[in-house]
Structures are given as structure tokens and as C-alpha cells.
């Protein structure tokens, strides 16, 4: 029997509908959430991602501030733009689209964003708060994955969750959110020995390695939940994930597709973080609590 399909596109539409109601409530108080997006250079994939984010803002009622800077932009110029946005009260969230041109130091740019406006969840302060179990902003893709798991009633407590990938953007924060949900977590990466032996133990398998068809059917425990975070292009230009979707779907209990899975949810959670930032600025949402990790 084919696995249940986790439709990220449909779920993202539900999330945006709920956010639109919160945006309307803010508007009634004279507050309009604002997201600033900086795109540097002419990377075609980045341009598509930015267009999708701006379109989603418009559909939700979030005001977008978009700046497309030339590839020749210097580090000092980009940092100055970020600092100006930090000081702009109309801007509640700041996103610098990655990757940046090779001559720019992306980490320095991310570090320059005020952590209260870091709606991508990549600032070291936000990463540290996530590690401490009291996130200010969750990294958007892992946040989207957690929302997808919740949408299918996947109770994570006591489950073995395996994450393939250890990036600062997905793998590491994904593991921390799963751990906070009381899952037992294993992180695999390019140096992991006998990857298949580990993935076959997973009740929840999250592939975020950026390698097409890395996860095959024989690597999946029957009935497991499989979330495909990968985005790869085939020789003919089609978008595909890290999972051999057709084969794995016959083994898994639930699976997310590419496209139409995690991608739309990543954008939806970016908007969710932006709305939450606006609510905090208006005093309508509490700051993160001081909960501590459990044994």
C-alpha cells in the first residue's frame, strides 16, 4: 500500500489563512507586519525563491520591502543596508537570501541582523536559544517540518528520529526541535558509516543532505514517516528531492513530496515568524519562556 502523502502545499495554505487573520487583528491596532528581503546578485534559483516569498507576503497581508542589490555589492554596503533595516520600526523581519556571491561573508551578514528581526532563525542568538530549548525564532525549514509532523498526528515522544544532514540551516536545528519534542535523535552526515543500517531504525526519517535519490526503499523501516527536505535538479531541469519517492512511498507510512512538500512550508513559517515578531513589537505576544531541557 502506498504511503500517506503529506501535502505541504495544502498545509501551507492553511497556515497562511490563519496568519492572515492575525495580520488583520494587528491592522486593527494600527500595526502591519513588515518583512524586508535583500537579494544580492542574479542567481536564478534565488530570484525564484524571493518572488515566491514576496507573493506569499502579499497574499497574507504582510508588507514586503524588497531590495535587489548588484553582485558587485561590497561587504560594507550590504552590512550598512542590514543595519538600516535593524533601525527601521516598520520592518519586523529581515531576510538576506542565501547563498550570497562568493566575495561576501554570509555569516558576518547573518550576525549583523538584529536577532529580534532574524525571522530566518539563523542568528547565533536564535540558534543558541533553540539549543537551550526556548527558541525565539525557529529556523524556518525545521519549523515547517515540525508543523507537517503535527498535521498528521505524529507523536514524537519516544520515537527514533534520524536526520540526514548537519547544516546550520536545517540539520542541526531540526535535531534540536525533535529532541525538544522528546524524540530520540540520531544525526547522520557524509562521514556516517553504514547509513542504511541507521536509517532502517528510524520511525521518522528526515533527509536534508542535498543528494538526489540518496534514500532508497531498502533504507526505510516499513511504516516510517519520511520527510524529504532535499532540493536537487535532474539533468532535464526537474526538481527532485533526496528520496527515491516512487519506491520509498511503497514502504513508508507517510511521505512528503518534492516539489509540494517542505518548500511551501518553509515560506509559510517565514511568514509565521514575521507575524510573531510584529505581535511582540506590539506587546501582543509574550517573549519566549525560560523553560529548560528535560532529562
Image (cartoon, rainbow, N blue to C red):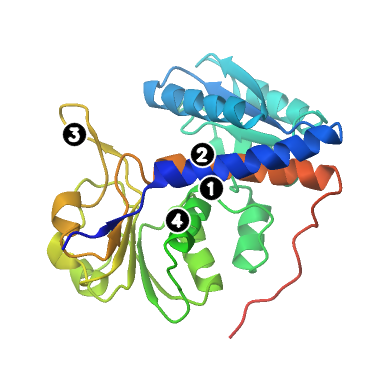
Q: Where is residue 37 in the image (x, y as percent from the top left)?
A: 61, 27
Mark in the foreground, 3 or 4 = 4
Decide if residue 275 is in sight here: yes
Mark in the foreground, 2 or 4 = 4
- Mark 2 and mark 1: Cα distance apart in space: 7 Å
Residue at 77 percent of width and 31 percent of height: 32
Q: Name the residue under label 1.
A: 140
Q: In the shown orientation, is residue 160 left or right of residue 112?
A: left
- Earlier in the chain: of badge 1 and badge 4, it is 1
Residue at 53 percent of width and 54 percent of height: 143
Q: Local crowd at mark 2 within 10 Å, few (<14), some, or many (≥20)? A: many
Decide if residue 244 is in sight here: no
Q: Mark 4 points at which residue?
A: 148
Q: Local crowd at mark 1 within 10 Å, few (<14), some, or many (≥20)? A: many
Q: Which residue lies furthest to the bottom in this view?
A: 295
Residue 250 in the image: above or below residue 263: below
Q: Where is residue 178 in the image (x, y as percent from the top left)?
A: 49, 68
Mark 2 in CB contact with mark 4 (< 8 angstroms) = no
Mark in the foreground, 3 or 2 = 2
Q: Local crowd at mark 3 within 10 Å, few (<14), some, or many (≥20)? A: few
Q: Decide which of 197, 100 is in the foreground and name it.
A: 197
Mark in the foreground, 1 or 4 = 4
Q: What element carries label 4?
A: helix
Residue 60 in the image: above or below residue 69: below
Q: Where is residue 63 in the image (x, y as percent from the top left)?
A: 69, 26
Q: Name the residue under label 2.
A: 267
Amino acid at each position: 500500500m502506498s504511503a500517506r502523502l503529506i501535502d505541504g502545499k495544502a498545509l501551507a495554505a492553511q497556515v497562511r489563512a490563519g496568519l492572515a487573520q492575525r495580520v488583520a487583528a494587528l491592522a486593527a491596532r494600527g500595526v502591519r507586519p513588515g518583512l524586508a528581503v535583500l537579494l544580492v546578485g542574479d542567481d536564478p534559483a534565488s530570484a525564484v525563491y524571493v518572488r515566491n516569498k514576496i507573493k506569499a507576503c502579499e497574499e497574507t497581508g504582510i508588507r514586503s520591502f524588497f531590495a535587489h542589490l548588484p553582485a558587485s555589492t561590497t561587504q560594507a554596503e550590504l552590512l550598512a543596508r542590514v543595519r538600516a533595516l535593524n533601525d527601521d520600526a516598520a520592518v519586523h523581519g529581515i531576510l538576506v537570501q542565501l547563498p550570497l556571491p562568493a566575495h561576501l561573508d554570509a555569516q558576518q551578514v547573518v550576525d549583523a541582523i538584529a536577532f529580534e528581526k532574524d525571522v530566518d532563525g539563523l542568528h547565533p542568538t536564535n540558534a543558541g536559544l533553540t539549543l537551550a530549548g526556548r527558541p525565539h525564532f525557529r529556523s524556518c525549514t525545521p519549523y515547517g517540518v515540525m508543523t507537517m509532523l503535527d498535521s498528521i498526528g505524529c507523536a514524537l515522544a519516544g520515537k527514533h528520529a534520524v536526520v540526514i544532514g548537519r547544516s546550520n540551516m536545517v540539520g542541526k536545528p531540526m535535531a534540536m526541535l525533535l529532541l525538544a519534542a522528546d524524540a530520540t535523535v540520531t544525526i547522520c552526515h557524509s562521514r556516517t558509516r553504514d547509513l542504511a543500517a541507521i536509517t532502517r531504525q528510524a520511525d521518522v526519517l528526515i533527509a536534508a543532505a542535498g543528494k538526489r535519490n540518496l534514500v532508497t526503499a531498502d533504507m526505510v523501516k516499513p511504516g516510517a514517516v519520511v520527510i524529504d527536505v532535499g532540493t536537487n535538479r535532474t539533468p532535464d531541469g526537474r526538481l527532485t528531492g533526496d528520496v527515491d519517492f516512487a519506491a520509498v512511498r511503497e514502504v513508508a507510512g507517510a511521505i512528503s513530496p518534492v516539489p509540494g512538500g517542505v518548500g511551501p512550508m518553509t515560506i509559510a513559517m517565514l511568514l509565521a515568524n514575521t507575524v510573531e515578531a510584529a505581535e511582540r513589537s506590539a506587546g501582543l505576544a509574550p517573549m519566549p519562556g525560560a523553560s529548560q531541557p528535560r532529562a
